Amino acid sequence: MIIYINGKFLTQRLTGVQRYALEITKALIKLGVQIKIIVPTTVNISALDIPEELFVKVNGFKNTLLWEQFSVSNYLRSKKEYVLLSLCNMSTLYNRNQIICIHDMAFAANPSWFHWAFSRYYNFMIPRLVRKAKKILTVSEFSKKEIGQRLGVPAKLVSVVYNAPSEKFKCADIKDLVWDKGDYFLFVGSFDPRKNLSILLELFSLKEFSNQKLIIIGGRSRSFKGVELSLPVNVEIKENCNDDELANLYRESKALINCSLYEGFGLPIIEAMASGCPLILSDIEVFREVAGSRATYFKPNSIHSLRTAFRNFLKKNSDIHQGDIIKNYEQSLTYTWEKSSQVLLNLINSV
């Protein structure tokens, strides 16, 4: 049997969802699975760290949404003994022999976070796709529960295939963890409303914390409504940061601060844990699932709660910080792309 991977994600900017798809694809290749990656003809496959012979360039619509809906299904129409694997929330309505990964239900939880066209498209497509798919994947137990509650999908049809830290973000050993941290805190994520970045900027604009520095790694997404950012002098934005730079920033940061209102997983959290970076996190269910008790939590809708959590973090002694870093690092080792791809492969074989 051939696994055809929907490669539309390779036309998009690399954020958490696209990284998930790319890492799962690479891990399946390492397992020796017979795969083919279907991509539009415009994708530059030579720039990717994947053997070129695994790609199938499919001509058709220039618009990637139409290409995904019609060109992919047309190509597969004559194929036998295959499954179509779509790893980035969306797929074609014209194929029943498929498995789809839905990362979260944010578009249903709060449509106002998104551009109206994106919200309407997802709210139209996702319920129909889950009725057609042979199996649904997601990235956390929290998202599995959300899919069940919001779409009425039986739990037995939804399987959790976790995110994991990429190799660049993993410290090779506990002895390689950095204890002498830099002079900054770190935020990693896109500039969209559910990331709740405005409350973090409010924190760093307070006179009390004017001597603390924040580095923001991220960019804007066309899917989400824009967020106007007014930066305090102690906040810096880096929009074009490669993985090597990000890995170093994680390792030497005082802490990753994530103030999201809603997430399906929160990939930067597990990357930070693997890098030896402490955590200051909004107290939402999925972050508790991923990070457990070794983080400083706050209510994401309360600047008072965030300020108190930040003060408490700054007051922690070095032994507590080091203990949290070690425990989080050890916990991160239980999340691997190899393990996740094997769970996925077992699932594919079962259907």
Image (cartoon, rainbow, N blue to C red):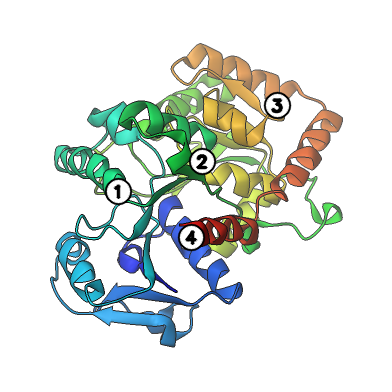
The residue under label 3 is 293
Residue placed under numbered mark 4 in the picture: 348
At label 1, the amino acid type is Ser
What distance separates the C-alpha of mark 3 from that of mark 1?
Answer: 31 Å
Q: Reading the chain from its start, which is encountered first: label 1 or label 2?
A: 1
Disc 2 crowd, CA 10 A, few/some/many (<14, 14-19, 20+): many
The label nearer to you, 1 versus 2, is: 2
Task: Estimate the x, y position of residue 212 in percent, counting from the top left.
Answer: 60, 32
Earlier-in-chain disc, 3 versus 1: 1
Amino acid carrying label 2: it is Gly
The quadrant in which residue 120 appears is: top left
Q: Where is residue 146 in the image (x, y as percent from the top left)?
A: 41, 30
| Sooner in the amino-acid sequence: mark 1 or mark 4 | 1
349 to the left or right of 102: right
Which class describes the residues within 10 Å of circle 3: few (<14), some (14-19), or many (20+)?
few
33 or 216, nearer to the observer: 33
Rendered view: 82 above or below 21: below
Q: Name the residue under label 1.
A: 221
Cα–Cα span, label 1 and label 2:
17 Å
Q: Position of residue 194 (x, y in %)?
A: 37, 32
- Quadrant where the C terminus sits is bottom left
Question: At label 4, which amino acid type do we have?
Answer: Ile
Residue 310 appears in which quarter of the rendering? top right
- Residue denoted by label 2: 266
- SS for callout 1: loop
The numbered mark, 3 or 2, whose residue comes first in the sequence reads 2
Marks 4 and 1: in contact by CB < 8 Å?
no
Pick out the residue farthest to the top.
304
> Is 252 drawn above or below residue 39 in the view shown?
above
Q: Residue 155 carries which label?
A: none
Three-letter amino acid code of the residue under disc 3: Ser
